[in-house]
Every structure is written in structure tokens, then in C-alpha cells.
Amino acid sequence: MPGPLAAVHRFNDAHPWDHNAHYHRLLLDRVPARVGRALDVGCGTGELVRALADRAGEVVGVDADPRVVDLARAATGERPGVSFLVGDAGRELPAGPFDVIACVAVLHHLPFAPTLERLRGRLAPGGTLLVLGVHRSSRFTDHLVDAAAVPANLAVGWARGRRARPESMTAPTAPAAMTLPEIAREAGRVLPGVRLRRHLFWRHSLVWRAPG
């Protein structure tokens, strides 16, 4: 690993913060004030599930890691309308339909297009699919944004100070294989009219509303 990048990783190890949770507000801003059912795929320790519960009558969180699901249940307690399940999003999902489906930092672990098709199939008419993903940088503009993210990442980590690594960051990770153009092409094929945005901190979002 090159020296500068290795230094960034060492800094992040000493000042860890959840880059995915940083974008929860962005996703929630695209959720109507009140919805019926919501699903969080790859829910981790349940932070987004608990936020969605303020707007949805029922929220289901699904994660493949039984230990993490236990942590989510313990952190949530007996909150009405909230449940957590152990499940592999690549093979099984709770029965729909759902008015909102969120999927945060999960798709790069799974077959991209088939998983999007599975999520699309669980949406209610007019429902919203919200994806926060990671991608492989391949273009000059990607590397420019990556470079801009480095000092911003250091600033956020420094402001938060030294702390223990959040439980939400202890799950196994995998490097992203798809580039943004590849994601745009495949997502556009499965979800006509999907909106793709690149964000700082090595993330992008996909937002799609099912036909009503």
C-alpha cells in the first residue's frame, strides 16, 4: 500500500468513524414523512432502522450476521413495529411489498443486477429504493474526488477524537469491483430512470421510485 494511503488508513484506525452512517440523513431526506412498511437490507446494528421507525408503521431490518442482529435487537429494545431478521439478501428477503427499501454498503458484496431485481420486486407501487454504495475509481474525475475526500476524512476523524471502533464497522468488508459507469449502466437497465449521485468519502447513491 502506498505511503500516503497507508497513513490515512492508520489515522482511520486511530480515529474511526462510520462513513456509511454519515449518509443516513441524505437517505432519510428522500423518505416521505409517513410510510407504511420499510425494509433495511444489511441493517448492521440498526441505526437506520431506528431512524426509519420514526416515519414508518413497520420496519424490518435484515442482516446476514447473527451477532450483529443480536446487537441491533439489544440496542433497539421492544420498540413497536420494529423487527430484525437474519438473512442473506443475495438469496432471501422478507415478503413485500415495502414502501421504502434501504440498502447501505451491501450491493458490492452481492451479484449487482440480480440483487437490484430482487429489491425492485419487493417494492410497493410508488415505493422508493435507496441505495448507498461503494465503487471502484476508474476515471480522472473519480481520483479528483478521492483526493478531495482525504483531508475531509481526516478533519472529521480528528474532530471526533480517538474512540473505539463502532460495532457497525466490525463486519467483514470487500473491495468494490464495479466502476461508476458500470453501476450506472446496470442500474439504469434494471431501474429505468434511477438517479445516481457520486458523494464524498468514496460513496455513491442510487434513488429510484417504482411506477405507481
Image (cartoon, helix red, strand yellow):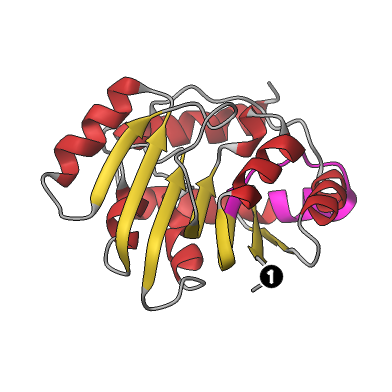
The image quarter containing residue 174 is top right
Q: Which residues are magenta?
A: 131-146
Q: How many labels, in total?
A: 1
The image quarter containing residue 87 is top left
At x 88%, y 47%, the residue is: 139
At x 44%, y 39%, the residue is: 94
Circle 1 Cα neighbour tier, 10 Å, few/some/many (<14 / 14–19 / ≥20): few
Q: Is residue 32 left or right of residue 75?
A: right
- Label 1: which secondary element: loop
Which residue position holds label 1?
211
**Is residue 137 shown in magenta?**
yes
At x 30%, y 30%, the residue is: 69
In percent of width and height, residue 18 lies at 41, 44
Residue type highlighted by circle 1: Pro
Image quadrant where one finds the N terminus: top right
Is residue 130 positioned above or below 104 on the image?
Answer: below
At x 47%, y 71%, the residue is: 31
**Is residue 157 shown in magenta?**
no
